[in-house]
Image (spheres, rainbow, N blue to C red):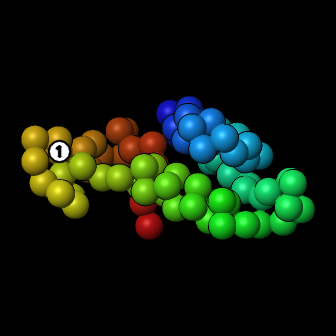
Amino acid sequence: MVVNTVGHLAEAAFHHPDLTVSYAFVIVKLTNHAAKGITDKDFELASKIEEVIMWQPGLIEGGALVGTPDDARFKYIKYD
């Protein structure tokens, strides 16, 4: 789910991050190949990825969406 979310956001932004996908983690590397470095585009996409991936319904905004139960069997993101 994380990889698909990052992929969707990157395509929508017409940006192409490098992803490393393993059993227990995903690493996202953002850089602007044309600029040969990190630009504001990378920071903006990183911010959007973090906003969407780290969203926790119920804990932040209340409402009908309560989020995943506080049970290790249902967790797939480590929130720090």
Q: Which residue is mark 1?
A: 66
Residue found 64% across the figure and 47% down from its top:
26
Residue found 12% across the figure and 54% down from its top:
62
Side (left or right) of 58 relative to 7 = left
Residue found 86% across the figure and 54% down from its top:
33
Inspect the image, locate mark 1, and give the three-letter code of the amino acid beneath it: Val
Residue 30 or residue 2, whichever sits in front: 30
Residue 61 or residue 35, whichever sits in front: 35
Residue found 62% across the figure and 36% down from its top:
11
Q: Position of residue 42 (x, y in %)?
A: 67, 60
* Residue 19 visible at all: no
User: Looking at the rendering, which quadrant does residue 3 occupy?
Assistant: top right
Q: Residues within 10 Å of mark 1 (few under 14, many from 20)?
A: few
User: Looking at the rendering, which quadrant does residue 64 occupy?
Assistant: top left
Q: Position of residue 46 (x, y in %)?
A: 58, 59
* Residue 51 visible at all: yes
Q: Is residue 8 above or below residue 29?
A: above
Residue 33 or residue 5, whichever sits in front: 33
Side (left or right) of 2 relative to 28 = left
Side (left or right) of 41 relative to 9 = right
Q: Quadrant of the C terminus?
A: bottom left
Side (left or right) of 8 relative to 27 = left
Q: Position of residue 12 (x, y in %)?
A: 57, 38
